[in-house]
């Protein structure tokens, strides 16, 4: 009998994780709130709690669909203690674009504000309202004065999301660029986890080395300024828990 498997991920990846695991028998998905983007110091403990809950629910294999995501290396010791692996890299922009391609783009213009499909869809809620700019407009230059461009790393080819991303760049007064990157290394990491044997995602120790290789490179740009359970379906994935408001999906 196949072991029960669970992917615990960031709510910002919910659509992508459900799409990637939909054809994988015995693999379920549980997501934490994407609002943790603005409070990354809370991610390690919430991930630990969800891992322990998953084991109590009978899941035998667990994978964490988070990169370091602004925790400053604090997520990896938790995962090492729990014996669980995560996505490689420092943040979602890196694993969507691919580590080499992202490094090239970041080196080309370090003062870049990054958007994914999720962040384009939720820009007003997570960025403008989440950072308090709607209530205190004077905060906007404090957060964004050092940015020069906005790069939209799209997972889908959706004209509505493209328009939202362009509007976000105009709202912030930034040059706009678009790169269609698809699912990137998220797809290969989930496929490796789902495989019964063979290749595996990198360990927490390996991630820690990779994430801290260039400490000057900015992490999740939502949290600061630039630079400085239901029954399991055997036929495929199921979203078993979701810590996010319905309107944010």
Image (cartoon, rainbow, N blue to C red):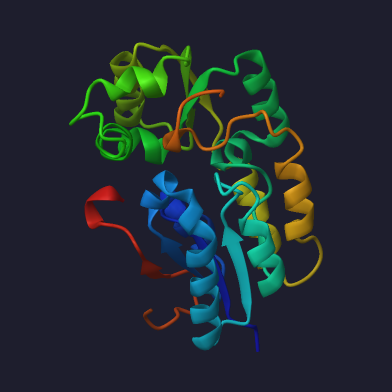
* Residue 194 vs residue 176, the one in the foreground: 176
The percent coordinates of residue 188 (x first, y second) are 67, 51
Q: Dividing the picture into quarters, in which one does residue 160 lie? A: top left
**Residue depicted at x 68% and y 62%:** 77
Q: In the figure, 205 relative to 157: above or below?
A: below
Give residue 11's position: percent from left, percent from top: 41, 55
Please state which of residues 34 and 99 is positioned toward the viewer in this rendering.
Answer: 34
- Is residue 83 visible in the rendered image? The answer is no
Pick the front one: 238 or 110: 110
**Residue at the extreme left of the image, as rendered:** 135
Residue 43 appears in the figure: yes
Whether residue 60 sits left or right of residue 213 in the image: it is: left
The mark tally for this picture is: 0
> Compared with residue 181, is residue 228 higher up or lower down, i.e. above or below?
above
Q: Give x and y (percent) for residue 90.
A: 63, 42
Q: Residue furthest right?
A: 198
At x 31% / y 51%, what residue is drawn?
249
Q: Residue at x 52, y 20 (%)?
A: 112
Q: Quarter of the image containing the N terminus?
A: bottom right
């Amino acid at each position: 009998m196949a072991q029960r498997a669970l992917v615990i991920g960031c709510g910002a990846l919910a659509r992508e994780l459900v799409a990637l695991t939909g054809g994988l028998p015995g693999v379920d998905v549980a997501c934490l709130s994407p609002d943790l983007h603005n409070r990354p110091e809370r991610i390690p403990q919430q991930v630990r709690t969800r891992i322990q809950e998953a084991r109590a629910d009978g899941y035998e294999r667990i994978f964490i669909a988070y990169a370091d995501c602004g925790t400053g290396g604090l997520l990896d010791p938790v995962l090492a203690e729990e014996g669980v692996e995560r996505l490689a890299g420092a943040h979602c922009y890196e694993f969507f674009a691919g580590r080499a391609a992202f490094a090239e783009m970041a080196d080309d213009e370090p003062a870049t504000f990054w958007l994914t499909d999720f962040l384009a869809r939720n820009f007003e809620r997570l960025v403008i309202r989440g950072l308090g700019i709607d209530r205190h407009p004077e905060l906007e230059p404090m957060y964004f004065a050092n940015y020069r461009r906005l790069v939209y790393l799209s997972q889908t080819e959706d004209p509505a999301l493209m328009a939202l991303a362009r509007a976000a760049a105009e709202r912030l007064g930034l040059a706009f660029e678009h790169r269609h990157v698809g699912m990137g290394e998220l797809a290969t990491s989930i496929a490796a986890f789902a495989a019964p044997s063979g290749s595996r995602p990198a360990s927490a120790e390996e991630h820690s080395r990779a994430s801290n290789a260039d400490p000057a490179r900015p992490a999740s740009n939502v949290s600061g300024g630039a630079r400085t359970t239901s029954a399991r379906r055997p036929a495929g994935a199921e979203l078993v828990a979701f810590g996010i408001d319905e309107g944010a999906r």
